[in-house]
Image (tube, rainbow, N blue to C red):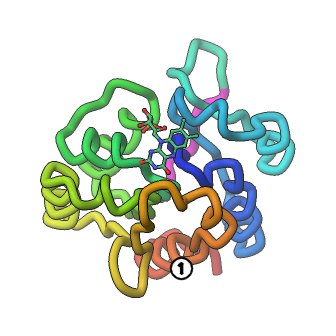
Amino acid sequence: MVCAAGPASGVGTLVRLARNRGWVVQVMATPAAVAHIDVEALEEQTGRPVRSQHRVPGDLRSPKADAIIAPATFNTINKLANGIADNYVLDVANEAIGLGVPTVILPFVNSAYAARAPFRRSVEQLRDEGVPVLLGPGAFEPHEAGTGAALRSGFPWQLAMDHVEKSSPRAPG
Ligand SMILES: Cc1cc2nc3c(=O)[nH]c(=O)nc-3n(C[C@H](O)[C@H](O)[C@H](O)COP(=O)(O)O)c2cc1C
């Protein structure tokens, strides 16, 4: 599940990591993230449609899945922590957490966003629900506002992959 944050255009890296490790990959994007990603290239890479809207009859059903939300925005983290489901990604993510599906959140936020009290509360709330938010030392560390563009290529997609693989009973192999 991809949100509209700097590294979104590089989500093909996560797809490649996951496919190399034997996972089937379905990309879902928030409506705002669609403009950041190459939908056609991702559909070719995964062999599946990129979903950002609810299914209409006849569309392929998305597989039941372990979930990685990356890059996760300030906006989506706050909404998810508070049970808001006003787009397809949030619908699926809220339900996944409620079902106990292993779900990992890898944020990409600057230090101004990260300093906000609502954001800090959201991260705590998600962790209290058992959802790993890979934020802090050894995980994603917020950058100074205005410097994110230079850091996109170093986004640690691998951390999310390693985490979901450790926590999922469905991990390939
Ligand atoms: C070019 C651009 C880059 C952005 N980068 C980030 C970012 O790195 N992290 C973030 O939390 N929000 C970022 N935003 C703001 C989000 O895109 C905005 O809050 C949006 O509503 C998030 O929608 P979503 O959470 O549904 O994907 C960026 C916006 C733009 C236009």
Q: Quadrant of the C terminus?
A: bottom right
What predominant SS class does the magenta segment belong to?
loop
Residue 148 vs residue 17, the one in the foreground: 148
Q: Position of residue 49 (x, y in %)?
A: 72, 34
Q: Which residue is rendered at x = 74% and y = 65% of the image?
A: 19
Q: Position of residue 149 (x, y in %)?
A: 62, 56
Direction top: furthest residue: 57
Q: Which residue is mark 1?
A: 162
Does 150 sit left or right of 135 as displayed?
right
Does 56 sit left or right of 19 as displayed?
left
Q: Which residue is rendered at x = 53% and y = 47% of the image?
A: 5
Which corner quadrant of the image does residue 15 belong to? bottom right
Is residue 1 shown to the viewer in this render?
Answer: no
Residue 4 vs residue 86, the one in the foreground: 4
Does 86 sit left or right of 127 as displayed?
right
Mark 1 neighbour density, 10 Å: few (under 14) some (14–19) many (20 or more): few
Magenta segment: 60-65
Q: How many marks?
A: 1
Looking at the image, residue 31 lies above or below residue 135:
above
Q: Which residue is rendered at x = 44% and y = 52% of the image?
A: 72
State yes or no: residue 63 in magenta: yes
Looking at the image, residue 12 lies above or below residue 136:
above
Q: Which residue is rendered at x = 76% and y = 65% of the image?
A: 16
Residue 158 vs residue 65, the one in the foreground: 158
For the residue marked with disc 1, what is the amino acid?
A: Asp
Does 65 sit left or right of 173 as displayed?
left
Please tell me whether mark 1 sits on a helix, a strand or a loop.
helix
Looking at the image, residue 86 lies above or below residue 3:
above
Which corner quadrant of the image does residue 148 belong to? bottom right
Looking at the image, residue 56 lies above or below residue 149:
above
